[in-house]
Amino acid sequence: MSAIEQAVVWLNDPLNWTNPGGILDRLGEHLGMSAAAVALGCLVAWPLGLWLGHSGRGGGLVLLVSNVTLAVPTLALLTILPLTFLGFGRPAVVVALAVFAVPPLLANAYTGVRQVDPETRDAARGMGLSGGQVLRRVELPLAVPFLAAGFRTATVQVIATAALATFVNGGGLGEIIRSGFGLSIAAGGGQILAGGLLVAGLALLAEVLLAGAERLVTPRPLRPARRRAARPAGNAVAGG
């Protein structure tokens, strides 16, 4: 039996879904870690990015933070943070994944505010709005599509990377893969493949759902226009 066939059999076994430590338990752990990490990243990155974008300063800082956090491997953070007061387990995993989520959240928040038309900003100030009111009532609503894009990118990246949590006793779907490696390749190959498919499928599902949400929060005039076949031109030529 090939690894693909073993994976299909393993996924079709109801006990692998419902038993303690099965797919449903691991899925809940995976989603919980990912949600906490993205939420923590948003709490840190969004206020900082919005403020820097509003003030018009700190573009270099945003670039530096993004590059530094992207340059540090998540696996390295997962092995270093458990040696601190966080210890092994879920807290260290959440912090490490939050660091990984910061770059797209921060960069998109900053860019979203900076892309606001200066004339729109000046008109708001001319109406007597304070700096904080301009940010809340003008810049922030116009930056929502950028915030949604950053949220989408960060969430998908975190979900895909959270499988590494198993190396520090963090749980999640990565535990299924690790358990498979604990067996012989002949016996555990299907389980390893099944775990990888579950992680990939969850990331793809998040991408599709958040892409739809991003489109919904983007005002219609700002949505990318779909390419259409040039029927009018063709008809005109035919009619001529």
Image (cartoon, grey):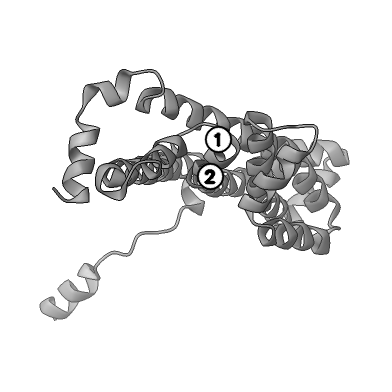
Q: Earlier in the sequence, mark 1 or mark 2?
A: 1
Classify mark 1: residues with Cα within 10 Å, few (<14), some (14-19) or many (20+): many
- Residue 154 placement (x, y as % from top left): 57, 46
The amino acid marked with disc number 1 is Ser
Q: Does the rendering let one see residue 102?
A: no
Q: Which residue is tagged 2? A: 164
Residue lying furthest front: 184
Q: Are marks 1 and 2 in contact (CB under 8 Å)?
A: no
- Rounded to the nearest angstrom, the CA distance separating label 1 from label 2 is 12 Å
Horizontal side of residue 120 vs 218, given as left or right:
right
Quadrant of the image occupied by residue 142 = top right
Q: Nearer the viewer, residue 199 or 4?
A: 4
Q: Residue at x 63, y 30 (%)?
A: 89
What residue is drawn where x is 87% and y is 42%?
131
Question: x%, y% of residue 171?
Answer: 52, 31
Secondary structure type for disc 1: helix
Residue 26 visible here: yes
Q: Quadrant of residue 203?
A: top left
Q: What residue is disc 1 on?
A: 34
Q: Residue at x 53, y 49 (%)?
A: 157
